[in-house]
Structures are given as C-alpha cells and as structure tokens.
Image (cartoon, rainbow, N blue to C red):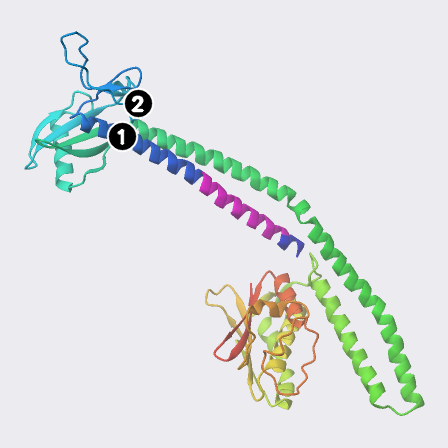
Amino acid sequence: MIKRLQRKFVVIAAVCLLIVEFTIIGGINGVNIYQTNKNADDLLNIIIENDGRFPEFDPKGMKHDKPQDNSDSASPPESKKPDKHRGFNEETKYQTRYFVVYADSNGEITKVDTGHVAAVSSSQAIEYGKSVLDSGKTAGTSGNYRYKTGDTDKGKIIVFMDCRSDSATKNRFLLVSCAIGAAGYILVCLLIIIFSKRAIRPVVESFEKQKQFITDAGHEIKTPLAIISANTEVLEMVSEPNQWTVSIKNQITRLNGLLKELLSLAKMEEEKPALTMADFNISDAVYDAASPFTTLAETKGKKLTIDVANGLSYHGDEGAIRQLVSILTENAVKYADEGGEIIVKLFTSHNGKETDLEVSNTCKEPPQGDLTKLFDRFYRDDSSRSRSKGEKKGGYGIGLSIAQAIVRSHKSKISCKAENGMMIFTAQLK
C-alpha cells in the first residue's frame, strides 16, 4: 500500500508539472510566433501604404516620403507624424527582402518589382502573384514568403516578404525551449521521486501505527474474550443455559470473527503479504468455494447459480482466491433481494489476458452515490441495499475491504456497479 501511495503521489505531481510546463512553453512560443507574424504584417502594411517601397525614417523615429526642402522659397514642410511602427529603424528597409506584384482592376498583372530580393525572378514573381489572385486571399503564406494584398487607384498591389530567417528563429526558439523544458521536467521528476518518501512519511507513519494498533489490540482482546467464554461455560455448567448466556456466547463468537478479519486485513495490506504464488486450476477453486453457499441461499429462499468456464488456470495464491470467492458470494447471498438470484461467473476477458470473476445478485434498490465506498472498512449501506423487513444481515463491514486487499495483492483490480436491477462485483485477475 505504501508503494502504491508513493507511486500515486509521484504520478500526480509529474502530471501537474507536465501541464504547467506545457502551458508555459506553449504560451511563450505562442506569444513569440504572434509577435513575429505581427512584425511581418506591420512591415507589409508599411510597404503597401507606400506603394511598394519603404518610407524614409529620420533618426528620431519620424517618417516622410521625400526629402524636405529647407529653402526660403519652398512651401512649408508637411507636418511629421510619429512612427506608429515601433522597433523599425533606418536599417529595416535594407534588412527586409521583398518583392512586389501589381495588378489592374481586372486581375491582370501589370508590373513586378524584384529589386529588393535576389531569390525570385520576374517570371517567378508573376507566378506567385497569379497564385494569390486566383486564391482570392488577402493575406497568408506562400512557400518561404508571407504576403498581403492592398488596393490602389490602379488596381491591386501584392507584397511578398521573405520570412525564412523569422521561421528559422521561431523553430530554433521552439526547439530550445522544448529541450530546456524537457531537461527541467526530468530533473524535477527525479527530485520528486527522491523526496517522495519524505513527503508521504507522515501518512506512512500513521498507517504503520494503525496496523500496529490493530495487531496489538487483537492480541490484547483475545485474552479477556477467552476468560469471558470460559466463565460463561462455567455458568452454564452450574445452572441451565439461558438467553443471557446464549447472547454472551453469540457476541463472543462475533467479536472473535471480527478480530480474525481485522488481522487478516492488516496482513493482506502489508507491503509483501505472505502469499504462496503458484499455478492452479482456478475453475475448480471457484466452484469449490462457491458451492457451499448453495444450501445457505436455498434456506433464505434465494437461488445460487454457478457458471464457471472449465479448465482455466491462474498464477496466484489459491487460498487467497478461494477466500475472495467466499467473501463475494457470501456478500451476494446476504444482500440479494428476497426470492432473488445470485450468479457466480468465471470467464476469460475479451482481450484474453485476464481471468474475470463476476459475482452478482438481484438488487432492486442499489446503493446511491459512489459505489467504491462499499470497499471501505466498516462501511455498510443496509438502508439502501434491498433486504427483507426485520432481517438481520450481520457481518462486520470489512469483508469487501479484505476482498479488495486480496485482489490488489495479485496486482489486479476489483470494481462494482449497479445495472438492470443487479449488483455486480467484478475482479479482473491479471
């Protein structure tokens, strides 16, 4: 159980860390890609607004389309507006490789300008322009180029910008961030594994104290129970047995059974329970363990059906598996509806890798809520589970806990569900 708790802690911490890393790395790369694309689109807009060329930038970040005439006879210079495209400077137009395609209102290409790029010829520029015009898109990516279209007085203008450098930068940033994130994730996971024992130490100590208490209490209670039992027998020898002595003996038997099951549960939940693992005929074991309950079911007006596939073999502790069958069958007989049916099945699962033990009983009013609570210690939902009026179920509320411990000790799973008026317990034995 401690190992299982430690693994669960490590898995939960690792999954949470993975989600955080994905969020951070994805967010950083998303912002980087968005900003890079936005810068490219801003450059395209500048070129389109200036009819296929870059405007002149002054050192103060002001822009104008032509040199200003400072002579006295010249007209007053146009008012300068601050450049809204921050991050661009005088060198930007020399660093940006682009070509321009012009088209008339009918969509016919009239001119191309490839003077700012070396990798594209005029004929190739025309092909790029036709492809964009035919697609009807106003912006996008074509090969290594990001493009955008604009309207002019004479028709359309399409600007293509070489984005190979930006794409390479984005890819390198993505690879580096993923590599650093993966290395950090592995390192933190190793630290989680190393320090996980320390993290769950309080829980482990509490669990160990609980097991020790159960063991010590079991041995301590046995002595007074033996004395009470002996005294009761002496009373019955001195005088005739009566309802009081009979009641005392019944409660002694009940307490002895409870102690036995508590000690058995504590033993099954140890890190390495003393199980004798070997191959055995599980078909015969299930049939032999379930058959004695046929008479018990008949005395309660119920029917027990045993449907076991022949010749199935299983590697495990035969005694523990027999105990599992007895617990589940007894539980089904106890809680089946009056006049109801109990079915014990053993079959090979659909994938052929597991042997499934299924014990079901009729139950018109199944428990409500989380059915996994039925496997908790001392949990009994008699009020919601169908039963005859006035019938006493007995039991200690830890039988299903023992069944769960047996299944887990075999590295398998047990579950329960309510459907079609049946309460079904299934042990998937691996």
State the residue position of label 2. 88
Image position of 64 with respect to 304: above or below: above
Range of residues picked out in magenta: 6-24
Q: Does the stretch in magenta take in 114?
A: no
Q: Residue furthest right?
A: 238
Q: Amino acid at mark 2?
A: Phe
Image position of 149 with respect to 403: above or below: above
Residue 268 vs residue 335, the one in the foreground: 335
Give the quadrant of the C terminus: bottom right
Element at label 2? loop
**Is 424 placed left or right of 196 in the picture?**
left
The quadrant where residue 117 appears: top left
The quadrant where residue 195 appears: top right
x and y percentages locating residue 5 in the rendered image:
63, 54
Q: Residue at x 23, y 34 (%)?
A: 143
**Is 228 placed left or right of 11 in the picture?**
right
